[in-house]
């Protein structure tokens, strides 16, 4: 089971089986070629390297045949021609015998002959050389026949030559059959028949095994790979067509790559379904933000008009109050109780009129926005500068503000506006916490954006507060402690930076978190 637990191991097992089949068939084919080469070698031996007794016997027979010719034995020229032909045949037979002996020496010792028997064969062949020497001496007795006695002598020479040839032929006939070409060929033919029959059995057996194993490999390939892939493909197509609630079933009984793929596809379908739900939530959230932005735009338009109308009377009141204060300082009896009370009332009028002026100025900033450009800014350093300013707020000295970031994170922002946003959120967090509370600032860098999270452990917010937190003039502070414009202006600044600000709270008493997401690079239209 270890070899089939994963797809990779199964593929390796199937490939190994296929390779073994290929190697087996290649081995059978190579063995057949080796046997064929052996048969060719035997044939080459029979034709070119085996001792040919028949050829030697024919060369020996020509010696005696050359003594019997149709030439006139009484003519000297005829006798000389006969002697030359005779000696040439003797020399040819001697050459054939040397080749015959060389081939015998080159032969391997057969199993049926031991070394001693082979040593007895070679001297018998060497004896034939003496017969050839004797035949060569007989040529000296060949003369033209001039008398009956010389005719008798020529007849005796022919008889002696015939007897010598007969002795040579007898010696050749008595050699062991192993040295005969016909016997060697018969044995080679029998061996080739046996090898051919054996090769045919092996080939048929190997073919049967290859067919059986190929069927097994094909079946395993369908069961292990093709069927699971088709099942997963159908399930993926169904999910891709919109049925995000469908989940794939495990297509393999092993915990292999297919099981991991099924789990991955099911996890992806879960994420699709979750993303769809989140998308619907974001659509609702964006719709609320759009309504809020339209409301802020309307309020900003109204605030701009009201601020312009109120700013002039406030300036007149402030100037008048300052003028009266200066005139009272120049009069005698200014130290009386009535004078002091008048001075205090004028100071209150001047102070409150300036406060109203600040409110109208903030209304104008809220409606118009800051047109300053955005440049690459180290956000971590900017937050540290804001924290240095917060340290001088003595009334919150018993609270703790934490921020940890040991590297530079750069984004294109309006530094002054972003400082105002962070300072406002940190101040709100400090105001929302009791003595000993903590406000933490976190900065995170993503691929194309940054995230600033300002979290406090203060009073928290309910659902209604979360819904209206960015509405102009909405505040949860006591009367006279806030105008309700701080978070509205913060929201407008973040929107002008193409970012988002999201308030999060688990309920009253559970603290609050404001998460700001800003792009690292401002869109071309906004970056100008």
Image (cartoon, rainbow, N blue to C red):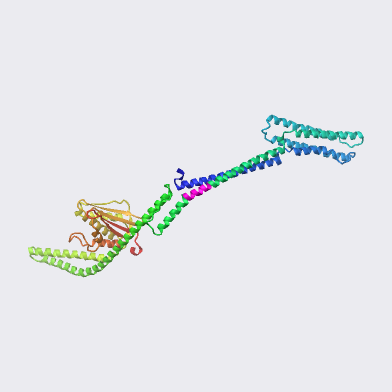
Which residue ends up furthest to the top in the rendered image?
A: 116
Span highlighted in magenta in the image? 213-223
Q: Residue 164 at x, y = what percent?
A: 81, 33
Residue 374 in view of the camera: no
Q: Residue 41 at x, y = what percent?
A: 66, 41
Q: Nearer the viewer, residue 275 or 361?
A: 275
Per the image, is 222 magenta? yes
Per the image, is 273 magenta? no
- Residue 302's image quarter? bottom left
Query: Which residue lies at the image location 65% right of the left edge and 39% below the top edge?
Result: 191
Query: Which residue lies at the image location 43% right of the left edge and 53% below the top edge?
Result: 232
Q: Which quadrant: the N terminus?
A: top left
Residue 205 in view of the camera: yes
Q: What secondary structure is the stretch in magenta mostly built from? A: helix
Q: How many marks?
A: 0
Q: Residue 516 at x, y = what percent?
A: 29, 57
Q: Nearer the viewer, residue 362 or 219?
A: 219
- Residue 466's image quarter? bottom left
Q: Nearer the viewer, residue 1 or 52?
A: 1
Q: Nearer the viewer, residue 87 or 228?
A: 228
- Residue 415's image quarter? bottom left
Residue 478 is left or right of residue 525, and the answer is left
Q: Residue 230 at x, y = what percent?
A: 45, 54
Residue 230 is left or right of residue 392, and the answer is right
């Amino acid at each position: 089971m270890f070899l089939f637990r994963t797809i990779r191991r199964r593929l390796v097992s199937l490939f190994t089986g296929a390779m073994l089949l290929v190697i087996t068939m290649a081995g059978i084919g190579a063995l057949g070629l080796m046997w064929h080469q052996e048969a060719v070698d035997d044939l080459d031996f029979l034709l070119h390297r085996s001792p040919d007794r028949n050829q030697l016997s024919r060369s020996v027979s020509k010696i005696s045949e050359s003594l019997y010719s149709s030439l006139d034995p009484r003519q000297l020229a005829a006798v000389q021609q006969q002697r030359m032909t005779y000696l040439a045949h003797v020399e040819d037979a001697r050459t054939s015998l040397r080749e015959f002996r060389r081939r015998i020496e080159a032969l391997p010792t057969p199993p049926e002959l031991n070394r001693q028997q082979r040593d007895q064969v070679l001297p018998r062949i060497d004896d034939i050389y003496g017969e050839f020497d004797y035949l060569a001496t007989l040529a000296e007795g060949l003369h033209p026949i001039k008398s009956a006695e010389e005719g008798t002598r020529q007849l005796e020479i022919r008889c002696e030559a015939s007897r010598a040839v007969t002795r040579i032929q007898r010696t050749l006939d008595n050699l062991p059959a192993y040295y005969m070409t016909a016997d060697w060929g018969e044995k080679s033919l029998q061996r080739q028949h046996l090898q051919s029959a054996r090769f045919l059995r092996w080939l048929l057996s190997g073919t049967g095994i290859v067919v059986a194993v190929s069927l097994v490999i094909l079946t395993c390939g369908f069961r292990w790979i093709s069927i699971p892939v088709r099942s997963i493909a159908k399930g993926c197509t169904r999910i891709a067509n919109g049925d995000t609630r469908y989940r794939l079933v495990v297509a393999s009984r092993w915990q292999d790559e297919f099981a991991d793929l099924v789990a991955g596809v099911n996890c992806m379908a879960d994420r699709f379904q979750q993303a769809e739900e989140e998308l619907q939530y974001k659509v609702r959230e964006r719709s609320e933000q759009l309504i809020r932005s339209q409301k802020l735009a309307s309020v900003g338009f109204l605030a701009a008009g009201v601020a312009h109308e109120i700013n002039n009377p406030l300036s007149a009141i402030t100037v008048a109050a300052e003028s009266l204060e200066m005139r009272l300082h120049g009069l005698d009896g200014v130290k009386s109780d009535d004078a002091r009370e008048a001075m205090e009332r004028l100071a209150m009028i001047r102070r409150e009129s300036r406060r109203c002026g600040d409110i109208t100025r903030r209304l104008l900033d809220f409606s118009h926005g800051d047109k300053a450009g955005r440049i690459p800014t180290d956000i971590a350093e900017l937050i540290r500068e804001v924290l240095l300013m917060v340290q001088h707020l003595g009334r919150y000295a018993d609270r703790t503000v934490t921020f940890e970031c040991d590297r530079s994170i750069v984004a294109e922002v309006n530094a002054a506006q972003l400082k105002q946003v962070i300072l406002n959120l940190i101040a709100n967090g400090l105001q929302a916490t009791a003595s000993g509370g903590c406000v933490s600032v976190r900065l995170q860098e993503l691929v194309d954006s940054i995230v600033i999270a300002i979290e406090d452990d203060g009073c928290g917010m309910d659902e209604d507060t979360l819904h209206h937190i960015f509405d102009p003039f909405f505040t949860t502070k006591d009367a006279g402690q806030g105008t309700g414009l701080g978070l509205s202006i913060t929201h407008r600044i973040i929107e002008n930076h193409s970012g988002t600000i999201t308030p999060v709270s688990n309920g009253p008493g559970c603290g609050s978190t404001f998460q700001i997401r800003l792009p690292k690079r401002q869109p071309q239209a906004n970056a100008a």
